[in-house]
Amino acid sequence: MEFEVTIKDTCTKGFWSCLETTDWIALISVLIAMIAGIAAWKSASASKEASKIAEKQLKITNEQRLDSIRPHLFIKNEKYVLRYNKKMYIGLFSNSIEDLHSNEVDGNLYLSINNIGEGHAKNIQIKWDFDFSSCINFIKEHQKENQFIVNYEEGSRIDFNESSSVYLEKEFENSEPIFITDKDYNIRLPYSYTRILSIYIHVLNAKHDFNFTSKSLPKLNFSITYKDVLKNPTIKEFTITPQITQKGSSTEDGEISKYELEVLLQIDEIS
């Protein structure tokens, strides 16, 4: 068996001096590859940053475009007068005392809604909600011989003792086709709530001798859903809290003969 052994001289001139041509070529190739890699990394980072800037600019542009067509419904607090005398069945709401003496009083409560946005609101849907059953139970507990409510069919109908009936199927829904910008719209509150609020105040006046807090009164919740011209939907939810201020009252023979008070419908957005 034979072995071939090749013996090379050891280079003692230093690392750089010992490099041969092939070594330099390999080293230069590595350096070129490293430089190309760094350049590619910088290019990719620059492209990524440019992409982020472009995306941010696109988002800002899109938001500006949406702002130019976005509606915004503003609902302000409303103030009413509630007046009662012994010739009336129950207290009657009006915008002012002067209105009570005119033929235009309808006794309803309304919200004033203004579109202060840049675009029109379309397909407006309003839904009302309050603790109806608890209110009915409270009134029935404190009325005498169907004094206020004659009959109540849950979810269907309520008969008040003034020859008036309310059918509840559509009582808690409103719809409007469009609210254009910078214009006021009056939306009627559910008639059942208006009547129940008036009865509540009457009962509490009698029970607490005209001295009770607004916390005892039923709140009314409602939601508004609407779309902009591109059909982008918006939904907002609110609570109406009645705040009362007694203006004057009197009794005769232990019974309420008249009273007058101010009712503020305080509107708070809850979403």
Image (cartoon, rainbow, N blue to C red):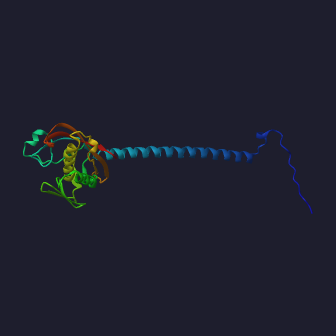
Q: Residue at horizontal 36%, vertical 47%?
A: 62
Position of residue 125 measured from the top left corner of the image (x, y, whole percent)? 25, 54
On the rendered structure, is 225 left or right of 252?
right
Can residue 48 be seen in the rendering of this structure? yes
On the rendered structure, is 140 left or right of 44?
left
Position of residue 232 measured from the top left corner of the image (x, y, whole percent)? 31, 52
Position of residue 92 measured from the top left corner of the image (x, y, whole percent)? 14, 46
Q: Residue furthest bottom?
A: 1
Q: Residue at horizontal 43%, vertical 46%?
A: 55
On the rendered structure, is 157 left or right of 97?
right
Position of residue 172 measured from the top left corner of the image (x, y, whole percent)? 24, 55
Q: In which quadrant will I find the N terminus?
A: bottom right
Quarter where residue 116 is shown: top left
Q: Is residue 141 above or below residue 64?
A: below
Can residue 189 be seen in the rendering of this structure? no
Q: Residue at horizontal 58%, vertical 44%?
A: 39
Q: Residue furthest top?
A: 247
Quarter where residue 241 is shown: top left
Q: Residue furthest front?
A: 253
Question: Which is more toward the observer, 162 or 141?
Answer: 141
Q: Is residue 215 above or below residue 228?
A: above
On the rendered structure, is 58 left or right of 87?
right
